[in-house]
Image (cartoon, coloured by chain):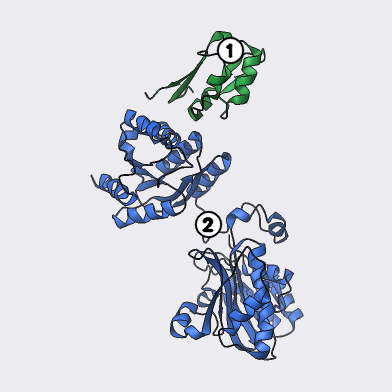
Chain colours: A green, B blue
């Protein structure tokens, strides 16, 4: 189930980068990111609404490639 | 969590306190055998987590082993204040010359333990304290600094006890203080602490209440006393509603959400932990509201935890609306709770704007929280509305 309050968008260039995927999985405190078998990133939809808006993922990736959307604004 | 009398005594025995000869009977034959081993008059006491045993006929005296077996059969079916008999304690009956009372609990105002001692027994001790204040002493002591027998001696001496009795009582009361501190108890009571006709002092009955959160720390003791982890040991059995609440709380380590107690009202409460929740509960009552539950939420629970709690409260029969209220929060995020509560309403098939009577959680991240509440049309307020006023708004909505 997608988030009711939060959505996270990741650019394809980042999503396919195993090193960045690892970083995103590591930094997120509420496990929104997971790694697929091929090293690409997967969004764990069930955890989207747990996002604490800490922006650690935004800072872990190149500018503008990870976006946090507040669906209530 | 309460201990049965036989468990309290097992703990006292561990600490060398003087106790009458006794045994636990789980069938009539046990009662006969124990009475025979004691070899004299015995008292049979139903093991329930409640007072009022004597009045209910669940405490009886027997002169012979056969009489003890008969009394066992009579006691077991008796339900005392809703509590079924777990077993029957068979104890030697001794002639009592004088009864004393010793209890230790926490003084919330002074924030330290208080030892209450009386040389007039423990029946209606509050009344004794009013009518004969010189016979009841209250002695505070530190839970941080080492304790000494002198504290116990002064507490006993303050009621006028002197000489041999003072010297014999002191180590017993001092040990009670040590037991209180060693096992994270909220109550350690000996009532009565009796002086027998032969001059000996014995612990005739004991009450122990342990801090529920200390269960993990004292697992070996609880295992030794055969207290199973699933035994809640509250004053009454937990309802399915309360058990489900505890499950929600246990499923996620983040924050607190799910410590609920059910009532018969129609207003579900999602309210702040500790003093805030008590104040809010009282405020709802004061305004004439009928709470469906008491609740604890705080410590920054996850969205999922707040959601599941909301769903649980909304599922309680008779609940028409919920009030989400806390004092000003710094360690809980307003937006996270708002997300959880709204999600809970939606998953329960309800419209948040219709089912949330009031949302009053000011504090950390309230700006984000209020945006969420606005989007879903929920009636909310900030800290300029007091907790009392917020409770009044919720009750008014119930009447509208």
The x, y position of residue B173, in whole percent, is 64, 76
The residue that appears at 70% across and 86% down in the rendered structure is B200
B208, A25: nearer the viewer: A25
Subunit under mark 1:
A
Pick the front one: B227 or B72: B227
Q: Which mark is residue A15?
A: 1
**In this image, B17 relative to B288: left or right?**
right
Q: Is residue B279 left or right of B209 when viewed as pictured?
A: left
Where's the N terminus of chain B, which quadrant?
Answer: bottom right
Relative to the observer, which residue lies in front, B201 or B86? B201
User: Image point 65% across, 19% down: which residue?
Assistant: A22
Q: Quadrant of residue B171?
A: bottom right
- Tag 2: Cα neighbours inside 10 Å, few (<14), some, or many (≥20)? few
- For residue B392, above or below residue B58: above
Above-or-below relation of A47 to B314: above
Kindly report which numbered mark, 1 or 2, lies closer to the viewer in this rendering. Answer: 1
Secondary structure category for the residue under label 1: helix
Real-space CA distance between mark 1 and mark 2, rounded to the nearest whole angstrom:
52 Å
Circles 1, 2 touching at the beta carbon (< 8 Å): no
- Give left or right: position of B357 versus A37: left
Q: Is residue B255 visible?
A: yes
Q: Residue at x 33, y 38 (%)?
A: B355
Read off the chain for label 2.
B
Name the residue rendered at 39%, 33% in the picture: B369
Question: Could you tell me which secondary element the residue under label 2 belongs to?
Answer: loop
Which residue is labeled 2 in the image? B237
Label 1 crowd (10 A; few <14 / some 14-19 / many >=20):
many
């Amino acid at each position: 189930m997608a988030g009711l309050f939060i959505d996270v968008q990741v650019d394809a260039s980042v999503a396919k980068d195993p090193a960045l995927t690892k970083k995103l999985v590591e930094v997120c405190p509420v496990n929104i990111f997971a790694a697929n078998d091929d090293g690409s990133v997967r969004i764990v939809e069930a955890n989207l609404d747990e996002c604490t808006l800490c922006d650690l993922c935004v800072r872990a990736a190149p500018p503008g490639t990870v976006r946090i959307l507040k669906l209530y604004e | 969590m309460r201990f049965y009398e036989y468990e309290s005594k097992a703990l006292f025995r561990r600490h060398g306190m003087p106790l009458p000869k006794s045994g636990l009977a789980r069938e009539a034959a046990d009662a006969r055998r124990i009475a025979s081993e004691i070899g004299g008059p015995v008292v049979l006491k139903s093991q329930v987590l409640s007072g009022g045993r004597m009045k209910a006929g669940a405490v009886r005296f027997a002169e012979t082993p056969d009489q003890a077996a008969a009394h066992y059969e009579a006691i077991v079916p008796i339900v005392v204040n809703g509590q079924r008999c777990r077993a029957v304690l068979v104890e030697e009956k001794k002639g009592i010359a004088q009864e004393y009372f010793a209890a230790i609990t926490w003084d919330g105002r002074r924030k330290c333990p208080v030892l209450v001692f009386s040389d007039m027994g423990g029946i209606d001790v509050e009344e004794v304290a009013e009518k004969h204040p010189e016979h009841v002493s209250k002695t505070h002591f530190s839970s941080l600094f080492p304790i000494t027998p002198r504290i116990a001696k002064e507490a006993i001496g303050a009621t006028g006890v002197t000489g041999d009795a003072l010297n014999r009582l002191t180590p017993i009361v001092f040990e009670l203080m040590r037991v209180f501190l060693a096992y994270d108890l909220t109550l350690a009571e000996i009532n009565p602490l009796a002086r027998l006709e032969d001059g000996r002092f014995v612990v005739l009955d004991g009450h122990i209440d342990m801090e529920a959160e200390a269960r993990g720390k004292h697992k070996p003791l609880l295992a030794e006393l055969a207290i199973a982890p699933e035994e809640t040991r509250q004053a009454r059995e937990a309802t399915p509603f309360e058990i489900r609440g505890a499950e929600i709380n246990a499923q996620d380590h983040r924050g607190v959400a799910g410590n609920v107690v059910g009532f018969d009202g129609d207003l579900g409460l999602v309210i702040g932990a500790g003093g805030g929740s008590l104040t809010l509960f009282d405020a709802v009552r004061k305004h004439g509201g009928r709470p469906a539950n008491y609740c604890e939420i705080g410590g920054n629970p996850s969205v999922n935890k707040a959601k599941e709690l909301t769903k649980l409260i909304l599922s309680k029969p008779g609940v028409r609306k919920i009030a989400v209220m806390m004092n000003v929060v710094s360690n809980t995020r307003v937006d996270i709770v708002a997300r959880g509560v709204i999600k809970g309403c939606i998953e329960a098939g309800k419209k948040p704007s219709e089912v949330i009577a009031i949302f009053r959680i000011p504090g950390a991240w309230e700006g984000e929280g209020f945006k969420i509440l606005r989007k879903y049309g929920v009636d909310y307020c900030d800290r300029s509305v007091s907790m009392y006023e917020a409770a009044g708004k919720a009750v008014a909505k119930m009447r509208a």
